[in-house]
């Protein structure tokens, strides 16, 4: 099983790449970029590659052919585009650059499925991805098969002195593929939600409801200087937390993106953090109290967003004959009041927190809490499917947040949690050289950090230092709210 294979068998990589000029080079001694696959055999890389690529296909399997082409909003992409773009990554950033004599499958794909890499060349306009009826789904699947075939054939014949370079890029490409697995789920939800027929991606086999959720407990965060960011020694996991008793462990450890580095000190003021996330029922109270009509609760830009977008409730809520419903991957279902509110913007999260006389946590507070308090795990992709998983039947929507008192419940999984921290470079941050330098660093303005993963995040992809980021108006992700407050 790839997840187990990935869960820490490989030492940290010491590699840095240079890609923008069409070549790659290693800088021995560079320790900033961990790589799960370093030290792996060809068979192990082959297995990891097949497992993740096949997982992507399993996610689109329930779709009808027509579903692959739809782009319902500018931030979403058609599932077909994701399938091609993740393949483009391996073809353009790995095969074309490192495999001598490689001939591309279709030259125009280099532009068509480039997302935003200026250093690679021009790319097709993002908002127009939905107009591309060609290449067909069949042709995109053929593209995937051809790139997979050539890459896997090549893995078996790479000379030892080139091995580290290749697996560094393949490892990054597989992390990229997993990010797009989550995006595929977000986009299927957005596309289906725009359809008056209320199509469902899958049927819900169980309602994860166990009675009223506990009142929020406030867990103390002591004053002091702490270190956050990825620890290249990989020792920060310790013995604490990140298990729900069902054997879950963080396979996502062992890799980190550049934006999680370097580990560095942060000062924490005395504070406390809520032991669970905000529920639909609690957010409904905000609506009923006129939260969307009270400008005193909103940031200036947030209030403008509410006004211009005529926002009156979270993105996928719908009121029908006085009753509230929510559009989910299970279709349109009655609003469950005891599960985490999801698909709220930073503005909505911030306004709710202000209404409650609290605030959102900083990412330093979140990371310290996740690593120093007992933690339980909520719904994640790849998790809860196995027999014995504790979230069977609710894998595409967060379940009820329950667990032991004094624990940071479902800090990992269920919903990405908005923080009040702008998405900025850590002190000493350096992006990778070349094209991969465009992966994270150039987005470090105008966005906020979210932590913890969600029901669409692969379990083998998430880790405590992981920094997701979205614009404050974004509601397209599975994004929710955990409160914090000052204790001055
Ligand atoms: Fe991408």
Image: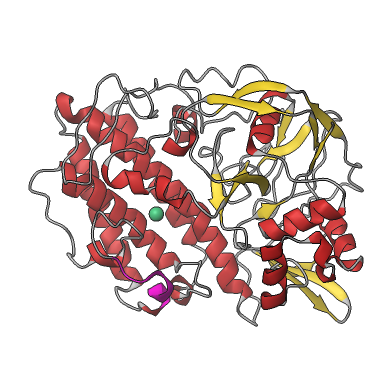
Residue 192 rendering spot, x and y as whole percentages = 59, 73
User: Which residue is at a point 79% across and 28% down the rendered structure image?
Assistant: 270
Q: Quadrant location of the C terminus?
A: top right
What residue sits 22% from the left and 46% below the top? Answer: 20
| 228 shown above or below 290 | above
Q: Does residue 400 sit above or below 310 in this rendering?
A: above
Residue 273 located left or right of residue 85: right
Residue 482, compared with residue 134, is above or below; it is above
Q: Main secondary structure of the magenta part?
A: helix
In the rendered image, residue 436, in percent from the top left (x then y), is placed at 32, 44
The percent position of residue 95, horizontal first and vertical second, equals 20, 47
Q: Nearer the viewer, residue 346 or 146?
A: 346
The residue located at (51%, 67%) in the rendering is 75
Confirm whether residue 338 shows in the render: no
Q: In the picture, residue 139 is in which quadrant?
A: bottom left
Residue 124 is covered by the magenta coloring: yes
Chain part drawn in magenta: 123-130
**Residue lying at 31% horizontally and 39% vertically, measured from the top left:** 170
Query: Quadrant of residue 351 in the image?
Result: bottom right
> Which of the two residues, 201 or 195, is positioned nearer the viewer here?
195
Decide if residue 167 is on the left or right side of residue 242: left
Viewer-proximal residue among 168 and 382? 168
246 sits to left or right of 45: right
| Quadrant containing ligand 1 | bottom left
On whether residue 264 falls in the magenta region, the answer is no
Indicate the quadrant where residue 302 lies. bottom right
Residue 410 appears in the picture as rendered: yes
For this view, does 180 lie left or right of residue 334? left
Residue 280 placement (x, y as % from top left) = 81, 58
Q: Which colouring convention does the figure follow?
A: secondary structure
């Amino acid at each position: 099983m790839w997840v187990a294979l990935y869960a820490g068998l490989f030492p940290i990589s010491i590699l840095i790449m240079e890609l923008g000029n069409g070549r790659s080079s290693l800088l021995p001694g560079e320790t900033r970029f961990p790589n799960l696959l370093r030290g792996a055999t060809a068979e192990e890389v082959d297995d990891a590659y097949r497992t993740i690529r096949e997982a992507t296909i399993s996610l689109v399997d329930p779709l009808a052919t027509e579903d692959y082409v739809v782009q319902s909003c500018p931030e979403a992409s058609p599932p077909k585009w994701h399938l091609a773009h993740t393949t483009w990554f391996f073809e353009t950033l790995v095969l074309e650059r490192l495999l001598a004599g490689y001939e591309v499958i279709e030259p125009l794909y280099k532009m068509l499925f480039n997302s935003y890499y200026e250093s690679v060349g021009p790319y097709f306009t993002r908002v127009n991805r939905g107009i591309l009826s060609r290449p067909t789904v069949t042709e995109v699947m053929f593209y995937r098969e051809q790139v997979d075939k050539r890459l896997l054939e090549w893995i078996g014949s790479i000379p030892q002195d080139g091995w580290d370079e290749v697996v560094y890029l393949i490892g990054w490409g597989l992390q990229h593929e997993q990010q797009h697995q989550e995006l595929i789920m977000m986009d299927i939800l957005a596309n289906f939600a725009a359809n008056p027929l209320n199509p469902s991606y899958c049927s819900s086999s169980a309602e994860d409801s166990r009675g009223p959720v506990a009142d929020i407990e406030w867990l103390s965060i002591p004053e002091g200087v702490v270190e956050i960011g990825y620890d290249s020694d990989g020792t920060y996991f310790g013995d604490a937390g990140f298990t729900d008793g069902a054997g879950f462990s963080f396979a996502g450890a062992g890799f980190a993106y550049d934006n999680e580095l370097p580990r560095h000190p942060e000062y924490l003021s005395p504070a406390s953090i809520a032991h669970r996330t905000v529920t639909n029922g609690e957010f409904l109270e905000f609506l009923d109290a006129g939260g969307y009509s009270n400008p005193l609760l909103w940031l200036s830009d947030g209030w403008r967003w509410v006004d211009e977008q005529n926002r009156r409730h979270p993105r996928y809520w719908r009121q029908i004959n006085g009753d509230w419903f929510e559009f989910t991957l299970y279709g349109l279902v009655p609003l469950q009041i005891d599960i985490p509110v999801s698909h709220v913007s930073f503005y909505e999260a911030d306004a709710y927190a202000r209404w409650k006389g609290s605030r959102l946590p900083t990412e330093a507070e979140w990371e310290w809490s996740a690593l120093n308090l007992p933690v339980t795990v909520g719904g994640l992709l790849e998790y809860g499917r196995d027999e014995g998983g504790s979230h069977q039947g609710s894998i595409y929507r967060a379940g009820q947040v329950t667990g032991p008192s004094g624990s940071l419940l479902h800090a990992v999984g269920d919903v990405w949690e908005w923080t009040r921290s702008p998405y900025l470079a850590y002190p000493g941050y350096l992006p990778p050289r070349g094209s991969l330098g465009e992966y994270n660093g150039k987005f470090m303005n105008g966005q906020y950090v979210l932590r913890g993963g969600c029901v669409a995040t692969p379990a083998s992809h998430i880790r405590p230092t992981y920094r997701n980021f979205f614009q404050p108006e974004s509601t397209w992700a599975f994004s929710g709210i955990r409160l914090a407050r000052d204790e001055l």
